[in-house]
Amino acid sequence: MLVKVFGSAVFGVEATTITVEVNIDKGIGYHLVGLPDNAIKESSYRIAAALKNNGYAMPGKKITINMAPADLRKEGSAYDLTLTIGILVASGQIKADEIDKYIIMGELSLDGGLQPIRGALPIAIKAKEEGFKGFFLPKQNVKEAAIVAGLDVYGVENVQEVIDFLEGKGTLEPTTIDTRAEFYKTLDFPEFDFSDVKGQESIKRCMEIAAAGGHNIILIGPPGAGKTMLAKRLPSILPPMTLREALETTKIHSVAGKLKEVGLMNQRPFRSPHHTISNVALVGGGSYPQPGEISMAHNGVLFLDELPEFKRDVLEVMRQPLEDREVTISRAKFTVTYPSSFMLVASMNPSPSGFFNDPDSPQTSSPHEMQRYLSKISGPLLDRIDIHIEVTPVPFDKLSEDQKAESSVDIRKRVTAAREIQTERFEQMENIHYNAQMNTKHIREYCALDDVSKQLLKTAMERLNLSARAYDRILKVARTIADLDAAPIVVSSHIAEAIQYRSLDRDGWLG
């Protein structure tokens, strides 16, 4: 008897429906075809034990299973449940007339229990697109899949529940989630708040500008000046995610298997990888490509602490994703693209000792040591960082004062107002939502300068020997400063402030 059951494979952040054909005939043997990996080939042992422990049996006949399309590589243990149901129906142990209306996915334990899978959200989206009635999956993944309206999503704990439902012996209630209510319910007060930071008013202003325009920023200062403390508080002033951004971000975390029994992500991700990270872990890849840290930080913040400690080749692979806001991973037979529109926040000491041109410090670095330390960060990478700012240690009188600093909630109101101006400006454009995403054509249109501003920028370009990319970055930052002031045009004061935020272009740094 031949039976067709449906599963799904995830490539990148999109799913592809897989047809599992099970044929049982005279003879003996278990033949699995259609490019399965080792985890799928081993499934026969898990299936046999699970069937026996639930009162069923593996047929002692010739079992041929084809996973179509046969030229597409299948990976992982999530097909265990699909194969099990197919074998039971094909061998006549259960009767299931509506089996072709459901996507069935789940990893089996030896007792028939189900373990969580990766990519439940993209699979549910594809199942709805292709007109399937429902989706059976492990209970741990049900919240992320239930985001998709118009699809019956059943979270099950063991294989027996699926069998009873398909035979009409038991009932299962589909899980439903009010996506909008879920999205808005926990926009609460942040764990890290800018009111904890004493002094550093100019740095907070930089952070506010970076958050308002989605700009990349690098903080340079001696140990203990507060660089990491400031960076960790940046997500607290970013505007709330839109529903579209929340869905995109949830999809990536679903593919990576990082969602732990949560539905829609409504907090912007903050990723802080250690400096020993490899290229593949940062940008994604592997023999079966998985999203890396830059994609996990999509619509959020990627914080690289102690930037020169990262291997140079690791930092260089970020150059193209920073520009294109997506990363493409190519293999011989397929190519996957992961979105990676993130805010890069980097911090570094100004020298190996951590103290640069500090007359009070006994530790100094020779010019050769300085050059070797700073040469780990390439010019092209620094060009892609819009704001460079020096962080100086906070004096004692500021640290000891009782006055509370401005809270993240108040700063976020100004940031959100500036973002709303940008959303309105770019509403007709598909992939541009804030100033940092502008290309050269948009910069010419929205950052037109008067003669005074042009002269000011010309002088700065000549004195600081800025590149064309740095010129564009200054204009983008100036546009954001104007938006924070609710000014329709960029004026010389906005340009002057934006020029200040190019510390590393000045003499005495990378000279």
Image (cartoon, rainbow, N blue to C red):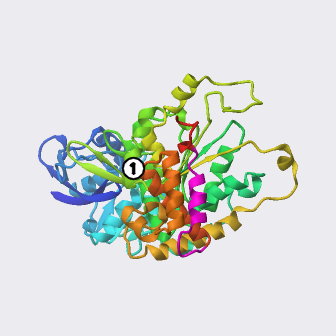
Give the magenta range: 486-503
- Work out whether 380 lies above or below 10: above
Q: Residue at x 48, y 44 (%)?
A: 382
330 left or right, relative to 304? left
Which residue position holds label 1? Answer: 321
Closer to us: 93 or 376: 376
Residue 291 visible in this rendered orientation of the protein: no
Q: Quadrant of residue 147?
A: bottom left
Number of residues whose C-alpha sits closer than 10 Å to that of mark 1, classed few (under 14), some (14–19) or many (20 or more): some
**Residue 79 drawn at (x, y percent):** 32, 51
- Work out whether 427 lies above or below 454: below
Q: Is residue 166 magenta?
A: no
- Work out whether 403 lies above or below 365: below
**Residue 269 drawn at (x, y percent):** 54, 55
- Work out whether 19 lies above or below 465: below
Q: Residue at x 47, y 32 (%)?
A: 311
Q: Quadrant of residue 325?
A: bottom left
**Residue 373 drawn at (x, y percent):** 54, 29
Secondary element at tag 1? helix
85 left or right, relative to 426? left
